[in-house]
Image (cartoon, helix red, strand yellow):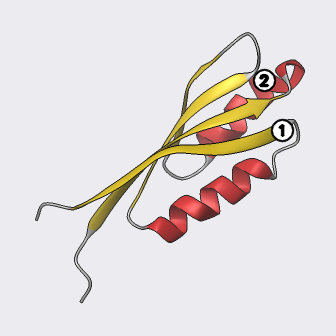
């Protein structure tokens, strides 16, 4: 059995500023995703938490599919063994 893990990633998501409210809402509905802030220039800081890297990548793919998302860049990724 594979040990439990916790993966944490942060992203910069460049968005169309005219669609920022809709994009923020859609990202916050994704599993383990939270928009921390969005700059006036349309750069959102997003944090992801998931039990494995595959889910992190699926959430990033889902963010990229949202209308108004221009680009997504992974800034940070770490994982730890989850404590029992």
Q: Quadrant of the N terminus?
A: bottom left
Q: Secondary structure at mark 2?
A: helix
Q: Position of residue 25 (x, y in %)?
A: 69, 32
Local packing at callout 2 (Cα closer than 10 Å; few below 14, some 14-19, many 20+) is many
Residue highlighted by disc 2: 20
Residue shown at 87% from the left, 36% from the top: 68
Q: Is residue 54 left or right of residue 66?
A: left
Query: Which residue appears at 77% of the width and 41% of the height?
Result: 71
Q: Is residue 19 left or right of residue 83?
A: right
Mark 1, secondary structure of its residue: strand
Foreground of the two, 23 or 57? 57
Tell me the CA gap for discs 1 and 2: 11 Å
The circle drawn on residue 36 is none
The furthest residue to the left: 84
Is label 1 in contact with label 2 (beta carbons under 8 Å)? no
Image location (x, y in percent) of residue 20? 78, 23
Picture layout, residue 27 above or below residue 18? below
Residue placed furthest toward the top: 40
Q: Earlier in the sequence, mark 1 or mark 2?
A: 2
Between 55 and 39, the residue placed more toward the observer is 39
Residue under the point 81% across and 46% down = 66
In this view, 49 is above or below 17: below
Assess disc 1: are there few (<14), some (14-19) or many (≥20) residues with their C-alpha within 10 Å of its C-alpha. Answer: some
What residue did someone put label 1 on? 70
- The residue sitting at 66% across, 40% down in the picture is 27
User: What is the x, y in percent for residue 12?
Assistant: 62, 34
In the rendered image, the vertical position of residue 55 relative to residue 72, given as above or below: below
């Amino acid at each position: 059995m594979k040990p439990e893990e916790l993966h944490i990633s942060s992203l910069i998501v460049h968005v169309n500023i005219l669609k920022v409210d809709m994009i923020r809402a859609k990202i916050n509905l994704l599993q383990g995703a939270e928009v921390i802030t969005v700059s006036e220039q349309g750069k959102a800081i997003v944090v992801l938490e998931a039990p494995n890297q595959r889910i992190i990548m699926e959430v990033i793919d889902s963010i990229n599919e949202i209308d108004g998302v221009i680009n997504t860049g992974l800034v940070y990724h770490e994982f730890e063994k989850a404590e029992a």
